[in-house]
């Protein structure tokens, strides 16, 4: 079964600085999808960014970008110009192409210091 | 407003007392799913549904039941809750069941405590 590992339980960053959250996954499949979700204190799950494994180009959404390394099975999230509102728990998730189950990592709690 | 709603938002119950957590979406989504969130474990999928009358087990289905009789509703049933089912539960939905790239929209969560 596919597994998703987030090795950093907690991270902190200074406001306006850049931070990178790590995610690795284990799979034998060639086609799949990767996601980063944000969970602020309100508990609402919010999609931050997503990547299709067959696309080599890294996804970007405003201040959020990913570094997708398929061979290394790595999918890190970079947050540039960090803002106080970025403080949240961040979850990395994997979804197969051939079924609809979804696997999440344990999460990384990000603190943004003013 | 397009949304996924869950009820109740908070529930404290006792071991063995059957309960149902409702989930409803108003976006005509095909796919719906239930997750539980526990500290240090992230979210784990309980059950999912590709469409009406089509459900399948996720990663941790033991102790739970679901049904999908209408497209908009996907209730989670705990026939005999136990303390190890104390958790934060999320319902989610996405437009097309056959497209894993679809964004999943999550409900606000249900905090369940089983004493």
Image (cartoon, coloured by chain):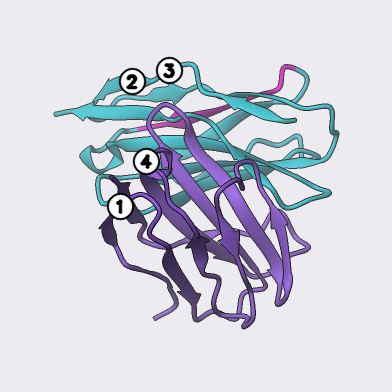
Real-space Cα distance between discs 2 and 4? 31 Å
What residue sits right under mark 2 in the picture?
A: A11
B4 is higher (above) or lower (below) than B88: below
Q: Which chain is mark 4 on?
A: B
What residue sits right under mark 1 in the picture?
A: B14
Q: Earlier in the sequence, mark 4 or mark 1?
A: 1
**In the image, what residue occupies the spot 29% across and 62% down?**
B9
Real-space Cα distance between discs 4 and 1? 8 Å
- What label sits on residue A8 in the rendered view? 3
| In the foreground, B79 or B12 | B79
Crowding around mark 2 (Cα neighbors within 10 Å: few <14, some 14 to 19, many 20+) is some
Colour chosen for chain A: cyan
Range covered by the magenta-colored residues: A72-80
**In the image, what residue occupies the spot 84% across and 49% down?**
A98
Q: Quick check: is A76 in the magenta stretch?
A: yes
Q: Position of residue A43 (x, y in %)?
A: 32, 50
Q: Is residue A54 left or right of residue B69?
A: right
Q: Which chain is purple?
A: B
**In the image, what residue occupies the spot 30% across and 52% down?**
B14
Quarter of the image where one finds residue B6: bottom left
Crowding around mark 4 (Cα neighbors within 10 Å: few <14, some 14 to 19, many 20+) is some
Q: Quick check: marks 4 and 3 in contact, CB under 8 Å?
A: no
Q: Quick check: marks 2 and 3 in contact, CB under 8 Å?
A: yes
Real-space Cα distance between discs 3 and 1? 35 Å
- What label sits on residue B83 in the rendered view? 4
Our reading of the magenta stretch's main secondary structure is strand
Q: Quick check: marks 3 and 1 in contact, CB under 8 Å?
A: no
Q: Position of residue B41 (x, y in %)?
A: 47, 30
Q: Are marks 4 and 3 on the same chain?
A: no
Q: Which chain is mark 1 on?
A: B
Q: Mark 2 or mark 4: which is in front?
A: 4
Quarter of the image where one finds residue A90: top left
């Amino acid at each position: 079964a596919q597994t998703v590992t987030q090795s950093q339980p907690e991270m902190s960053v200074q406001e306006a600085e850049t931070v990178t959250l790590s995610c690795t996954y284990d799979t034998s499949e060639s086609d799949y999808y990767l996601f980063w979700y944000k969970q602020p204190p309100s508990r609402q799950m919010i999609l931050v960014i997503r990547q299709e494994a067959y696309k080599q180009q890294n996804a970007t959404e405003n201040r959020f970008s990913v570094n997708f390394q398929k061979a290394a099975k790595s999918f890190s999230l970079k947050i540039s110009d960090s803002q106080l509102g970025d403080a949240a728990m961040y979850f990395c998730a994997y979804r197969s192409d051939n079924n609809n189950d979804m696997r999440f990592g344990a999460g990384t709690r990000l603190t943004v210091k003013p | 407003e397009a949304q996924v709603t869950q009820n109740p938002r908070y529930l404290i119950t006792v071991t063995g007392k059957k309960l149902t957590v409702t989930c409803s979406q108003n976006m005509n989504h095909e796919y719906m799913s239930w997750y539980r969130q526990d500290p240090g474990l992230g979210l784990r999928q309980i059950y999912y549904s590709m469409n009406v009358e089509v459900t399948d087990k996720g990663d941790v289905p033991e102790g739970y039941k679901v049904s999908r009789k209408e497209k908009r509703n996907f209730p989670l049933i705990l026939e005999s809750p136990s303390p190890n089912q104390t958790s934060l539960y999320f319902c989610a939905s996405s437009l097309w069941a056959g497209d894993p790239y679809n964004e999943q929209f999550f409900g606000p969560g249900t905090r369940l405590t089983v004493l």
